[in-house]
Image (cartoon, rainbow, N blue to C red):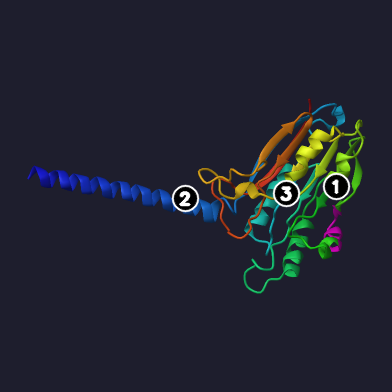
Amino acid sequence: MAGHMITRRFIRAVLIWLGILFTMAGLCAIDAFYIEPYFPRVITQEVRIEGLPKSLDGLKIVQLSDLHIVKCGAREARALRLINRINPDLICLTGDYIEDDGITPGNYTWRDCGKEATRFMSSLHAKYGTYAVMGNWDRRELIPDFKGAGVHMIDGRDVTVRIRGGKMRISGDSRAAANGERKSVVPTIVLDHFPYAFDELALSRRHVDLVLSGHWHGGQVGWPLRMTDVKYLSGLYKIGRVQLYVTRGLGMHSLAVRFNCPAEVTLIVLRPA
């Protein structure tokens, strides 16, 4: 009789634990497939820059990357609402605005994705403009459309923006920035879809303050399956005076899943060091 009681208790305990595990797995699946991919969060990162003019103290820069847009939907609408609440001074876009032909569902082509990405970009508003570079999935044929949406495409060149009576240099060419001026009174931000050039920029001792990158999506799946073979995956890094911020991005590639790695709208706030 006692043996039967032990067996029943054991079976009951096993069933309870199985129920708990299945419930947790179900909640994780809901989070990974329906919440984190489609409910972006604002991640605020304060960046301190040596010699930042007082006029630029508190400057708000929104960074968006890796949209991988097929068709504008609820995620993109939520992102736009978040950006409008921030009321940014600058918007910086760091590539991969469209999804690849081989991945898009149905009969969508890269041109269809480009039209949707252009529509999204036309809804972006910042006091001092929106600046962008292309990513590895983007087609150069879309540049005129993006420009028509009010975006300053700066691949391979630098621009100097007048802000609050001061100046800021925004570079779309990391190689040129690495070979640029050693000293400058103008804060310099480099937009580069890939974070690969960060080491070169930091070691070049040229005047670069901040690099904004994306590409990795933060791995899309975080702990306990986080990618460990990527040097600059997400977040803020610093070598000497040069800093790098890698955003987790807004969209997804290949698999529409995120876990412990939610879609991100990045807010960079500049402060003097």
Badge 3 crowding class, 10 Å Cα cut-off, few under 14, some 14 to 19, many 20 or more, is many
Residue drawn at point x = 85 percent, y = 45 percent: 175
Where residue 260 appears, x then y in whole percent? Answer: 54, 45
When the figure is inspected, residue 96 is found, relative to residue 104, above or below; the finding is: above
* Amino acid type at mark 1: Asp
Label 2 vs label 1, nearer the camera? 1
Q: Residue 84, can we see it?
A: no
When the figure is inspected, residue 16 is found, relative to residue 183, above or below; the finding is: below
Where residue 135 appears, x then y in whole percent? Answer: 76, 55
Q: Earlier in the sequence, mark 3 or mark 1?
A: 3
Horizontally, residue 177 falls left or right of residue 217, namely right
On whether residue 145 falls in the magenta region, the answer is: yes
Horizontally, residue 28 falls left or right of residue 17, namely right
- Tell me the number on the disc at residue 133: none
**Quarter-of-image position of residue 69:** bottom right
**Residue ID for mark 3:** 64
Q: Residue 147, can we see it?
A: yes
* Amino acid type at mark 3: Leu
Q: Earlier in the sequence, mark 2 or mark 1?
A: 2
On whether residue 190 falls in the magenta region, the answer is: no
Q: Mark 2 to mark 1: distance in Å?
A: 40 Å
**Quarter-of-image position of residue 190:** top right
- Circle 2/circle 3 CB separation < 8 Å: no
In the image, the segment drawn in magenta is: 144-152
Q: Mark 3 to mark 1: distance in Å?
A: 18 Å
